[in-house]
Amino acid sequence: MGLRQFINRDIEFQNETKRGVVSVRILYIVTMLAFLLDLAFAGIPVIKKFPYRIGLIFLAMIILFANTYFLNTRATIVLYLLFTFTFSLSMIPCFGWSAGMQNYFIVMLMVCFFAAHGSLGFKIILTAIVLCVRIAAIFIYSGTLPEVKISEVSGKLIQSSNITAVFLSAVILAYIYSHRENVEESKLMKFNDRLMKEANTDQLTGLGNRRYARAYLESVKRASYLDAISVCMADIDFFKKVNDTYGHDAGDEVLKAVSAALKNGCGEKTLVSRWGGEEFLIVFTGVNGDDAFMILEKLRSEVQKMTIKALENEIKVTMTFGLTEYDFGGDMEKAIKEADEKLYLGKTGGRNKVIY
């Protein structure tokens, strides 16, 4: 079993995540490594002066680390807090106040809020206890010198070791407790984007649906950089006859083929949406009515030449288009209505034509 698997091994209690105990395990390891460096920098005289105290600290760390695999999360965290109290306060006389042992209280505060399970009141109580002990340490130990003389360089190295351990512990806690949330938030955002896309997309043709088209029209209406907007309503001629003759599956194939032709023929900057049934709304942005008419005439001709294979059938269809140019001072609904009325004129006037 690798070190990572060993540290990440789950606890035996149900309904508890392992983040809390994994965090504490890592904190114990970081603290132990920093403590070993402190002793190396302080030298043999400090170890000889406090052999039992140092030995008990190491023994306590080993036992408490081992117990993280058997205790529940709350007990593990409470014991970690008690240990860190004892470790910090008992080592100040060994290394002096300037060694920064009291800085481990910062890690304790983060543990209280990130790792500790329970209500906000419980976390506030733990935090208040940490704060009170930290203030008491100022009155009791502030300015304390080490009982065994430590050189200035060694003192700075010990201080650097403890500051590094505190910073590293804070980063680890922040990563463990923010990484999952960030991942879940990213997944949620992607899921919401997918839902939004599905809600605005016609599933059969892949075009925007009427809901999307209306939102697009509102955004286009507010666009100050556009000098022309042309609106078209298009309809597949005798589509009901296609369904009645060849079946709805064949009708679906016709809709998909016509949608692809419209999308490809209009270009990326033009909205082609399925308005409903066999009816399509096309919005040309930055294109005046005359230019839009030429594009639609070409499309009409291409659709007429198409042969759509549906099951074992080869189907040919035509389309009728009603086109109007949007007046920026008017109502967009009015423009759609005008395009629809021109479509109706095309239908009643023989179909397979563009009315502008």
Image (tube, rainbow, N blue to C red):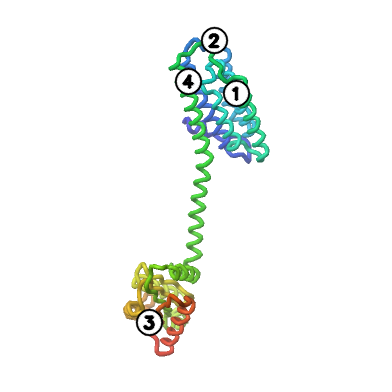
Res 119 → quadrant? top right
Q: Which residue is drawn at 38% across and 77% down?
A: 313
Secondary structure at badge 1 equals helix
Q: Assign a secondary structure to mark 4.
A: helix
Q: Is residue 131 visible?
A: yes
Between the C-alphas of marks 2 and 3, the distance is 99 Å
**Quick one: 154 or 300, which is closer to the camera?**
154
Q: Mark 4 and mark 3: span between their CA atoms?
A: 85 Å
Q: Nearer the viewer, mark 2 or mark 3?
A: 2
Above or below: residue 2 compared with residue 39: below
Quadrant hosting residue 89: top right
State left or right for residue 139 relative to residue 235. Answer: right
Question: Mark 4 or mark 1, which has the lower sequence index?
Answer: 1
The residue that disc 2 covers is: 49
Q: Residue 90 in the image: state x and y as whole percent.
A: 59, 18
Q: How many marks?
A: 4
Between disc 4 and disc 3, whose residue precedes? 4
Q: Look at the numbered discs 4 and 3 and tell me whether their residues touch, using CB distance below 8 Å.
A: no
Name the amino acid, label 1: Ile
Q: Which of marks 2 and 4 is nearer the N terminus?
A: 2
Give above or below for 297 relative to 5: below
Task: Categorize mark 2 by other alpha carbons within 10 Å: few (<14), some (14-19), many (20+).
Answer: few
Residue 121: give its label: none
Tag 2: residue type?
A: Lys
Residue at (40% x, 82% y) in the render: 320
How many angstroms separate mark 4 from mark 1 (CA)?
19 Å
Identify the disc placed on residue 158: 4
Q: Mark 1 points at which residue?
A: 138
